[in-house]
Amino acid sequence: MSKVILGGGISGLSAAFYLRKKFPLLSITLLEASNRNGGWIKSEKHDGYIFEQGPRTIRPHGNKAINTLDLIEDIGLTNEVEYLPKNHPAALNRMVYVDGVLHKLPSSFSSLLTKNPPFTKPLVQYLIKEFRQTSKTVHDESIYDFVKRRFGSEIADYAISPLICGICAGDAKRISVKFLLENLFYDEQKYGSITKGFIKNIFKKQPQPVILNTLARRAKSEKWNVFFFKDGLEVFPKRLEKVNKENNVDIRVNQSCTSIELNPTKVTLHMDSNNKVETRHLIATISAKKLSELIIGHADLTKLLSSIPFVTVCVINLHYKTELLKQEAFGFLIPPKENLPILGVIFDSCCFPCEGCTNLTVMMGGHWFKTFFGENPTDEHLLDVALKQLEDILKIKDKPNSFKINVLKNCIPQYIVGHNETVDKIHKYVEDNKLPLNLCGTSYNGVGINDAVYSAKTMVDKLQN
C-alpha cells in the first residue's frame, strides 16, 4: 500500500510526518511542484537580520498551538525556539492608523475604562451595549455585520476590520463570522448575547485539561505571546523535511502535476514531464484553487473547490542601517475605510532586535490588490507606493539600504460567508463518491501555521490504513 502527498508546504510535510509515525511500513511519496519545500514560509538570512517573506511568528495558545509545539519538540527543534513574552512592547503595543494619526489599541483592563481614540467612548460602554442588544437568528453572516450589530460600527471599523486585514488580508464585510469569532457567534445565537453566553459558560463543567509536553509547559509558564526560530521560521519546514527523509519518505521537488484522475480504486496524477504517478490514495495539501484546476471528471467537486476565493499579497521587506522608529510596537494596521494602498506595517526590528538598524515589512493588496495595483504591477511601482506610505505615516524619508519584494499570488484563502457549508459539501462529495482522496491545509479549517499542522494531524488520525 502507498500514499502520495501533493504539496510540500507545512501541511504536506506535517502530513508526511504523522503518516510515518502512524504507519511505519507505509510507502509515502511527497510531490512538490516548485524547487523547494516550505510553501509560503520563506526566510532570507542576511548579515545580522532576516527577511521573513511570509509568516514570521506563531501563536502558542490553544489546542492547535499545543499540537504544533509538540511537533517542534518531536523533531528536535526545541533549542531553536525563541519567544516574545506578553509584557514585550511588541505584544502590548499594536496600532491602527486612522485620519492621519497612529492610535494605540487598548491592551489592559484599565484601558477599557477610559476613552481611547479612534473610539469615541470607553470600550466598557460598547460591552454594556452588547449586553442590552437584542439577538438575531441567522445561520451565518459577515464578521463585520456581526460585530457592528453587537458592538456598533466603531468596533467593526477600527478593531475588527483591520484585524481581518492583518490575519487574512481580507474584507471583514465578506469574511464569515465563523472564521474568527465562531464561539461568540454561537453564544449569541444560543443565549441571546455574547455577554450572557460568557456568564453561562463560566458555570459549565470544564473539559479535562490537555497534558502538556515540555515546550508547551514552558510557553504557559513563561507567558509567551508569540514564538519563532532564531534563524527564521523556515527552520521549521526544513527540519520537517530532513526528518521525513531520514524516515524514508520519498520527497521530490520540481514535480508539477498537470491533471488528476480520481476513481474509487485508483488515483492517477499526470505530471508535466509526461510521466504518471499512480496511487491507491492521494492526500492533497495544495490550495483548493490549485486542486480545482487539476481534477478531471468531477465537475461538482471542481465547482465547490473553485468557489473558495484567494487573495494576492505583496510583502516588501526593508532594511535601514539607522534607527528610525519612534515607537516600540508590533506595528500598525490600516482600516479599509481609510482607502489606502497598504494593509499595514510590521516593525520587525522591535520584534527581532537589530542593533543600530531598522527592519520593516510592508503588507499590501490582499482583497484590494487589483483595485490598487492592477493585474501585473512592476516591482518599482510597488516599492514606490510602500515608501510613499512610510513617508506619509511614519515620516521616514530615508531610502532602504536593502529590500526584498515578493508578490504572493493567491496565497491566502478567504473564508467568506457560507465557507463552512462549502467545506462540508466538499467532504460529502468525496465520501459519497468513495474517492480515495483526503484534503488538508489552509483552504478549509484555518489559515495559520497552527491550523495547517493541526489539519494534517487530524486528517491522519482519521485514516484507517
Image: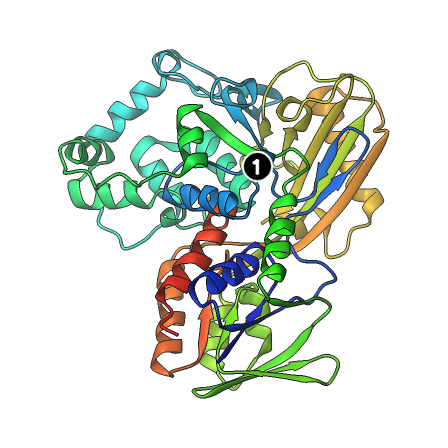
In this rendering, does residue 175 appear at all? yes
Placement of 244 over or under 96, stated as above or below: below
Residues 127 and 226: in front is: 226
Q: In which quarter of the image is residue 390?
A: top right
Crowding around mark 1 (Cα neighbors within 10 Å: few <14, some 14 to 19, many 20+) is: some
Q: Where residue 285 sits in the image (x, y, percent)? A: 53, 64
Asked if residue 204 lies left or right of residue 357, the reply is left
Residues 6 and 388: in front is: 6
Query: SS of the residue at dot 1?
Result: loop
Q: Where residue 233 sits in the image (x, y, percent)? A: 63, 41
Residue at 59%, 77% (x, y): give it: 294
Residue at 37%, 62% (x, y): give it: 461
Location of the C terminus (image quadrant): bottom left
Residue bearing mark 1:
57
Residue at 81%, 43% (x, y): give it: 381
Amino acid identity at mark 1 = Thr
Placement of 67 over or under 441, stated as above or below: above
Placement of 194 over or under 249, stated as above or below: above
Asked if residue 353 lies left or right of residue 443, the reply is right
Q: Quadrant of residue 293?
A: bottom right
Residue at 51%, 31% (x, y): give it: 226
